[in-house]
Structures are given as structure tokens and as C-alpha cells.
Image (cartoon, rainbow, N blue to C red):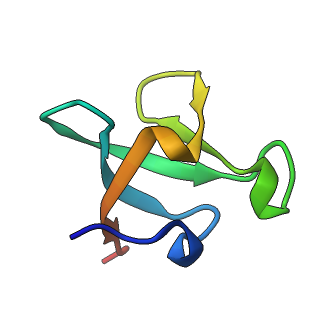
Amino acid sequence: MTIDHEELRAGAYYWARRTGADEAEVVQVSDIFGRDRDYWTIAVMGSDQHHSLSEFAFLIRLIRP
């Protein structure tokens, strides 16, 4: 079961899996390029690269304690 892209929140962190990968990783939905959903990207922790939302399946939203 995955989270639909329409349910994602800018600035939130998620466990996500890249398409074709076996392992999940922590990512952040970034609005650095614009607040409109069309400009959102995915920032992978430990990297300065941004990726397309379509490259990931989102598994669980991480909630701050």
C-alpha cells in the first residue's frame, strides 16, 4: 500500500522506495522550486540532488515526536 501523490504535503518527510529498488529511504517533499504541486521535487537525505515525484512510491509519512 502506498500514499497517493495527491495526499503528499510539501515539507513533510516520508519513507519511500525508488521505482525498481528493494530498499526504502527517507525523503522530503520539497517546494524549493515553487509552491505549486507541479514544481515539487523529492530531496533524498544525504544528497543535494532533487528527483521527480514519479520516481518514488511513498510508504509512510514520518511524524515529528
Residue 12 picture location, percent across and down: 52, 64
Q: Is residue 22 above or below residue 33?
A: above
Total marks placed: 0
Question: Is 58 positioned to the left or the right of 11 in the image?
Answer: left
Q: Residue at x 14, y 36 (%)?
A: 23
Task: Quadrant for the N terminus, please.
Answer: bottom left
Q: Residue at x 52, y 77 (%)?
A: 7
Q: Nearer the viewer, residue 55 or 26?
A: 55
Q: In which image quadrant can residue 46 be found? A: top left
Residue extending furthest left?
22
Residue 35 picture location, percent across and down: 84, 61
Q: Is residue 47 above or below residue 6?
A: above
Question: Is 40 positioned to the left or the right of 35 in the image?
Answer: left
Residue 9 picture location, percent across and down: 59, 71
Q: Is residue 35 above or below residue 3?
A: above
Q: Residue at x 31, y 50 (%)?
A: 16
Q: Residue at x 57, y 54 (%)?
A: 29
Q: Is residue 65 above or below residue 23?
A: below
